[in-house]
Amino acid sequence: MLFQVRMDVCLPHDLDPKTRSEIVAEEKQYAQELQRAGKWPHIWRIVGEYANISVFDVESNDELHALLSGLPLFPYMDIHVTPLATHPSDINA
């Protein structure tokens, strides 16, 4: 199942800089593990924002929820999920 996920990160301005660096490093490691596993095949930065648009390829809604809630930055994110389906005009489908 494919999902488009928009993630907007909203870190508190008063977050300790060391804590911020640690969380961001953990986030990068976790995200790259999911990419290597094929669960997170696409990620794009949104220009001018601390946000991204990603595509996840998972078996279920529950799996997606587990992966997203496991993100170290999850408590600081606004997340919007859109399920995707094959388009009948897609020549690669």
Image (cartoon, helix red, strand yellow):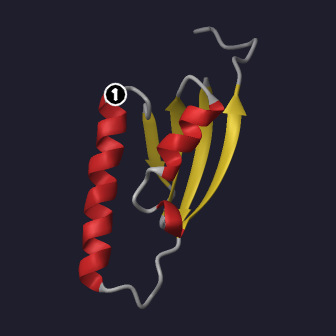
| Residue 79 visible in rendering | yes
Identify the residue shown where x is 47% and y is 83%. 12
Q: Amino acid at mark 1?
A: Ala
Dot 1: within a 10 Å radius of its alpha carbon, few (fewer than 14), some, or many (20 or more) residues? Answer: few
Q: Is residue 31 above or below residue 73?
A: above
Q: Is 23 displayed left or right of 50 in the figure?
A: left
| Residue 49 visible in rendering | no
Identify the residue shown where x is 32% and y is 86%. 16
Q: Is 45 displayed left or right of 93 in the figure?
A: left
Q: Quadrant of residue 43?
A: top left
Q: Secondary structure at mark 1?
A: loop
Quarter of the picture containing the N terminus is: top right
Q: Is 43 displayed left or right of 33 in the figure?
A: right
Considering depth in this image, is 61 or 17 the residue closer to the camera?
61
Q: Position of residue 38 (x, y in %)?
A: 39, 26
For mark 1, what is the residue?
A: 37
Q: Position of residue 78 (x, y in %)?
A: 61, 63
Q: Is residue 85 above or below residue 82?
A: above
Q: Is residue 3 above or below residue 8?
A: above
